[in-house]
Each structure stands twice: as C-alpha cells, then as structure tokens.
Amino acid sequence: MVSKDQTIGGIIFAVCVIIGILYTVGLFYFGGNPFDWGLSFTLIAIPVFVAFIAVMGIGAWIGWTMATTPPPKPIEEITSEIEEEKKEETAEAAKEETEPKEEKKPEKKGKSEK
C-alpha cells in the first residue's frame, strides 16, 4: 500500500524528469543548432540550461526519496508504545521493591588460600 507522501513523491519525480527531458529536447532539437545563434545567446543559454537541469535533478531526487521511503508510524502508536514501556518499568521496579533481598555473607578463606 502506498502512502500519500509516496504518491506525492512519485508525482514530483515524474514531473521533474518529464520537464527536464522536454526542456532539453526543446532547446537543442527544435531550436536548431544553439551555436549558430551567436556567442551572446550561448553564453546565457548554456549556464541556464545547466542550472535548470540541476534544479530538475534535485527535484527528481526529492521525489524519488519521498516515493521510496516508507511512511512513519502514527503518533498514537508511538505514544501508546512509550506508555506501555513506562508501565512495564514501574511494574518491574515495584516488584523489585516488594521482593526480600537476600544478603550474601562474605566467604571465609581457608588456610590454604592465604
């Protein structure tokens, strides 16, 4: 079963990858040879292209992480586990207090052990 966060992450991943591919195809395929447009456009287009692909890569990475990370436990479940642990600890402490403790007597050393 897929959680809401995983669904959103999958959508983010897919959108970033599709937009990155469409931008690359549109810039280099439909625009013709980018080096024929003049040096000034190339000086702008290449860094913008690299930055755009980097942003899309980060977005895709975030989407992939969200899509593949399992959802966390509900808060109610975590708090109930903590309460159960506290009850067990207090029950053990009460049990130790009610049980009589046996005192150990020091062992006497024999003449051969000295």
Image (tube, rainbow, N blue to C red):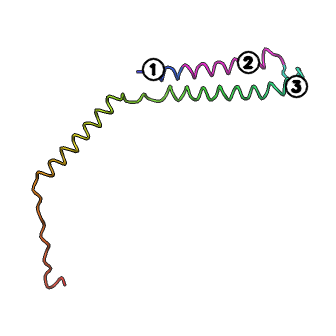
Q: Is residue 105 above or below residue 30?
A: below
SS assignment at label 1: helix
Where is residue 81, by image quadrant?
top left
Q: Amino acid at mark 3?
A: Ser
Judging by the rendered image, the residue that carries numbered circle 2 is 25
Q: Given this view, does label 2 or label 3 mark the residue nearer the observer?
A: 3
| Residue at numbered disc 1 | 4
The first of marks 2 and 1 along the sequence is 1
Start and end of the magenta stretch?
11-32
Q: Residue at x 47, y 23 (%)?
A: 5
* Residues at marks 2 and 3, CA–CA distance in whole angstroms: 21 Å
Residue 57 place in picture, x, y as percent: 64, 28
Looking at the image, residue 61 sits to the left or right of residue 73; the answer is right
Q: What's the residue at 16%, 47% (across, down)?
A: 94
Position of residue 39 in the picture relative to residue 78 (left or right) = right
Q: Nearer the viewer, mark 2 or mark 1?
A: 1
